[in-house]
Structure formats: structure tokens, C-alpha cells
Amino acid sequence: MNGPSNSDPRIDQAVVTDDAVVVAHEKLLGKQPDEKARYRLLPLNLLFIFSGLIFFGATYLGRYAGYFDPKVFDETAPKATAAAAAPEDPIEKGKKVYATVCAACHQANGMGLPGAFPPLVESEWVVGSEERLIRIALHGLQGPVKVKGADFNSMMPAAGRVAGSGFNLSDDRIAAVLTYVRQEWGNKAGPITTEKVAEIHGKEGDHKPWTAAELEKLP
């Protein structure tokens, strides 16, 4: 008895595998076999970008979210007014200016250097006419000058906001430092106001450094 012929269509159908059936179906649908079940790895560069954005967002919210308090960003809340800063004590302000500008020559104790820089302690120029003292501070002093019976002949540079000034101090800082030296080291003279300095400054403008002879002609 002869065996079944290889041309029997039933035999061809029996040996068809499941993979062959899937491939045939894919072809009928116009698709290629999906060997990876349509799964694709996310590119690493996109993964790093998304991770960085998530980290940045979390950090930003943690720092600036205000604990999500609704009052933190309440635009309808009344504006808070800053408390007015207390005015600085002119003596303290003058002390700072003196330490920065004047102490190198007149020394921290106001005694100056013999033969070089005149003392400010009990100086007739310091505790005397405020208008003379303001002019000296604003424009400087040059040439010979006698202080407490001793002769000096040095150059004091201009300290105010005038031409040639090396310090460019405002009128209020000039007033503060002059008030300080008139009331420090046992000196007992009245304070000098910013208004008085501004008056002399406006009157004299960019005057050249004064001499003692010129100042002695003033009241």
C-alpha cells in the first residue's frame, strides 16, 4: 500500500508553523514582522534631558514655592512699607570718615606729627571759626601755618567734592567729620551742619587750596 503523497495539500497545511502564519498575516496587513514587539528603547540623550528637567523643576519648587502658602504670592495683599532707617549719628559717621581720610596724617589721637602735620587737639583752627575750618576741609590748605605756637609748612589736600579733590566727600560727610574733630579729644566746639557746609561750598565753588593768610582775613 502506497503511503500518502507529498503533494497532498493536507500534509502541507499540517507542517505550517505558527511563525509562518504570523508572517503571512503581517504581509496581508501590509506590515513587516515585529521582531521586538514594537518596543523601542528611549535614546539615552533624551533620558538625560528629561531627568535634568525633572531635577531642575523639583529644586526650583523646593526653593521658591513658599511651601505653597497662598499668602506668599498674594497680589491683593496691602504693600508692606519699609520702616524708615534711623539716621546715622553724625559723630559716628565723622569718626569713620576721620579713620579713613584724616588719621594717616593727623593720627588716630589727633596729635599729628611734629614738624609735618599739625595737631587737631585744642587747635585754634579746629575749635575756632567754623567757616575757616569748612573751607580748609573742602579745598585744602597750603603754605606755612602756625598751630598752637608751632610752625608747619605742609600741604593738606582738598577733601570735598571740588576740582582736584582726592577724596570727593559729600557735604554731609564733611560736616560729620568736622563735627567729630571739634568734639573729640577734649575739644569743645559746636557741631557743623550739612547746610552750613553746602552754603560755603556753593559760595566758593572749586576754590584752589587756601593759605593761612587768606583764611585769617575771613571772619
Image (cartoon, rainbow, N blue to C red):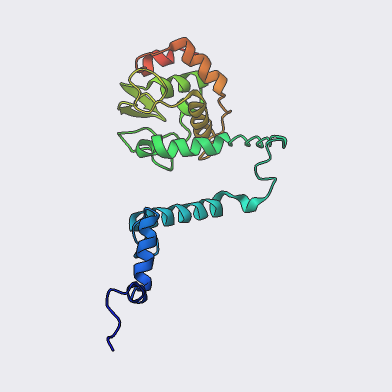
Residue visible at 32% across and 73% down in the picture = 12
Measuring from the top left, give residue 142's x and y in whole percent: 32, 21
Q: Nearer the viewer, residue 83 or 23?
A: 23
Q: Nearer the viewer, residue 146 or 1?
A: 1
Measuring from the top left, give residue 35's x and y in whole percent: 34, 65
Q: Quadrant of residue 104?
A: top left
Q: Is residue 39 above or below residue 184?
A: below
Residue visible at 49% across and 29% down in the picture = 173
Whether residue 42 is visible to the viewer of this picture, yes or no, is no
Q: How many marks?
A: 0
Measuring from the top left, give residue 120's x and y in whole percent: 44, 34
In the figure, is residue 78 to the left or right of 131?
right
In the figure, is residue 162 to the left or right of 80?
left
Whether residue 77 is visible to the viewer of this picture, yes or no, is yes
Measuring from the top left, give residue 179's x and y in whole percent: 53, 31
Q: Nearer the viewer, residue 36 or 7?
A: 7
Residue visible at 38% across and 18% down in the picture = 212
Q: Residue furthest front?
A: 1
Could you tell me which quadrant the N terminus lies in? bottom left
Q: Nearer the viewer, residue 33 or 170?
A: 33
Q: Quadrant of residue 27?
A: bottom left
In the figure, is residue 49 to the left or right of 184?
left
Residue visible at 33% across and 76% down in the picture = 11
